[in-house]
Amino acid sequence: MKVFISWSKNSCDFGGALNSAMERLFDTVETFYSPEIPAGEQWLTMIEEQLTDTDFGIICVTKENQKEQWLNYEAGALSRQVTDRRKRLGVLLLDFDDKNDVDGPFKNFQMKMATVSEFKSLMKSLNELGPKIREDVVNDRIDREWPKLEEELVKVRNSAQKPGIPDRGIHEKVDEILRLVRDFDVASTPPVLTAFPVTTDVRMRGRQFVSRLYLMTKGREIHFDFRPVNETTDILDITASMSDQEKRTIENFYRSFFPDVAKRLLIADVAWKDKFINSADETVETLIQSSMIHE
């Protein structure tokens, strides 16, 4: 059984402690924790492979990282990979006082507070899927490991920044509103689960396509969300503005993975969103019909 541990920013050390603890909690569980990627490996390719071949995901979420694009990307990929995200994908809230304080995509997942009782509940879900160790044995092991995890939780909580209320002018406020609108689909909606059924082969090619795009844009802060709409149409949502040349390059990459001439790719980047901003419940059919999307 393989477990993927997802982290970002200030949840890194806790993720490492959790990774070490998992080895002692379950003898037959294999974990993936990205800081352990060997030097010289192509880290993005390896992460993509691990996301594809995993059975259970644990996402370490803090107030600081809950809207980080990479954490949301991994959560979305995991949610599409596991067959039942309510049982196979857990969100561990490290420094939250209440689950209602979570603001963003993770509200749609199985959220657990970082307490020993709720951690045991999360481990029970994992145990039922694979290791199937006696519950009292698992709980005893957790009791022994919890003090080490608690040390890292204290560090996370102590490092939480409490920003004051800045004195900003009207232009700064307008800029912030525009940024929030641009990132609305990333920061304020759950990772999209494709309603249209796709085969394993198509899903794998889609992930390879996205991996190629990340390599192409290495060094830029950018996020790609690729998903099939129907048998003939795929959509690529990009959180940055792309030039016409870049869009043509993306289309060429797409065609190398999906050579079927009957299929087409719709590209929605920031430049398009500036001209035509959809509400959260806008249907994909509207996107397809819009002449403002680059085809």
Image (cartoon, rainbow, N blue to C red):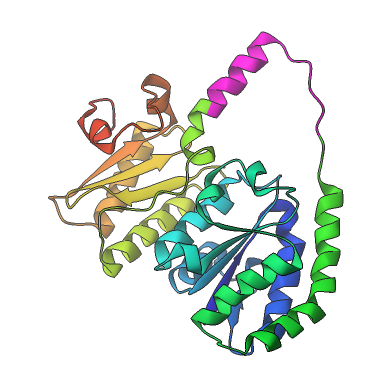
Residue drawn at x 69%, y 86% as measured from the top left: 136
Residue drawn at x 61%, y 69% as measured from the top left: 122
Residue drawn at x 87%, y 50% as measured from the top left: 158
Picture layout, residue 106 above or below residue 163: below
The residue range painted magenta reads 163-180
Is residue 37 in sight in this rendering?
A: no
| Image side of residue 36 versus residue 196, left or right | right
Q: Quadrant of the C terminus?
A: top left
| Image side of residue 252 versus residue 186, left or right | left
Hey, which quadrant is residue 11 in on the image?
bottom right
Picture layout, residue 126 above or below residue 161: below
Residue 17 in the image: state x and y as whole percent: 76, 71
Residue drawn at x 80%, y 73% as measured from the top left: 146
Picture layout, residue 197 above or below residue 139: above
Picture layout, residue 78 above or below residue 229: below
Is residue 139 in sight in this rendering?
A: yes
Residue 166 colored in magenta in the image: yes
> In the orientation shown, which residue stands out farthest toward the left?
262
Residue 59 in the image: state x and y as whole percent: 61, 60
| Image side of residue 250 versus residue 168, left or right | left
> In the orientation shown, which residue stands out farthest toward the top?
170
| Image side of residue 115 versus residue 231, left or right | right
Q: How many marks?
A: 0
Residue 14 colored in magenta in the image: no
Identify the main secondary structure in magenta: helix
Residue 58 in the image: state x and y as whole percent: 59, 65
In front here: 212 or 15?
15
In front here: 161 or 42?
161
Hey, which quadrant is residue 269 in on the image?
top left
Residue 276 in the image: state x and y as whole percent: 36, 22
In front here: 214 or 223?
223
